Image (cartoon, rainbow, N blue to C red):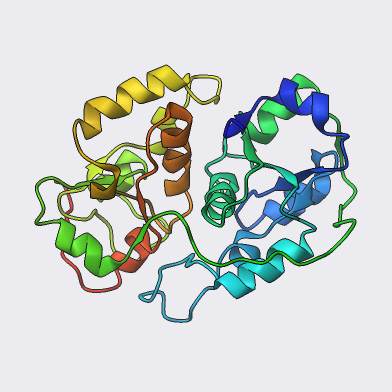
Amino acid sequence: MTPIISVEGLLLIYKDPNVLIFDVSNGPFAKNNYLKNHLNKAIFVDVNIDLATINIDLAKGGRHPLPSLEEFSITLGNLGISKDSHVVLYDDKNGANAAARFWWMLKSVGHKKVQVLDGGFQMAKNTGFPINSIEEFPKVKGKYKLSNWLLSLVSTDEVEKNLKNHNSLIIDVREEGRYKGEFEPIDLVSGHIPGAINIPFSTNLNKEGLFLEAKELKKNYLKIIKNRESSKIIVHCGSGVTACHTLLAFEIAGLDIPNLYIGSWSEWSRNEKETVVEK
């Protein structure tokens, strides 16, 4: 199954009861926006509650640390997701708000049928996908047994060790201004991790907000990663959410999914680690 699905493709299958659609938009007004307009059948997923377990001390895991496997198992069951469910995820930022994060989490626990809607809510709306304002709830709740995270995660200490490894590559997917330290709207410190290169997640998309073709993504990333193994590549963002957009792009390109630094800048910058601000 391809990691993304077009609006046209979803239109063909969305009435199937085994197809579950989730709105994973994030932000202070996400739930209100969902209640005004969302795709037919879509259930709202809150990244702060359903996809993270937030600590009081953000130096331990950053702003969106992963929930425990037990917590995530309960969440999946409460959302009505079973091992056989065909899960389609979307948000209002071309997959970068939290749809790709949910995709990564599902893929990391071995779920087979999971896709992100290419172009997100706006593309679906513009294409004429049915929309309503009725809050949707899972039809059936159950249990979803989990055993382990299957995709690679790295800690702050592992990132720091890799700074001295010339064969490693650390990719920061935040927008250029935040990477350079020109401004920081969320975290306490501006700048970036020493040695990290900036490849904003937006470079994964074309002018219409759709993912670039697989061969173009592959060409672009192979130029950057060259002969490095995926085990030597670390991807991060502000809090481990938007980074998953680039991990999704690697999957689309047919490349091995790199390591995710889940704490990202929000954790690194709160641990008195060395930072870089470009003048």
Between residue 185 and residue 110, name the one nearer to us. 110
> Residue 203 at what x, y percent from top left?
39, 29
Taking the spot 15% from the left edge, 49% from the top edge, the residue there is 195
Q: Is residue 11 above or below residue 191?
A: above
> Residue 139 at what x, y percent from top left?
90, 56
Q: Is residue 194 left or right of residue 235?
A: left
Query: Which quadrant would residue 4 be assigned to in this image?
Result: top right
> Residue 144 at what x, y percent from top left?
71, 64
Q: Is residue 85 left or right of residue 108?
A: right
> Residue 12 at what x, y percent from top left?
81, 24
Q: Is residue 68 above or below residue 110?
A: below
Between residue 192 and residue 220, name the one nearer to us. 220
Q: Is residue 102 above or below residue 14?
A: below
Query: Which quadrant would residue 153 be assigned to in this image?
Result: bottom left
Q: How many marks can you see?
A: 0
Residue 182, can we see it?
no
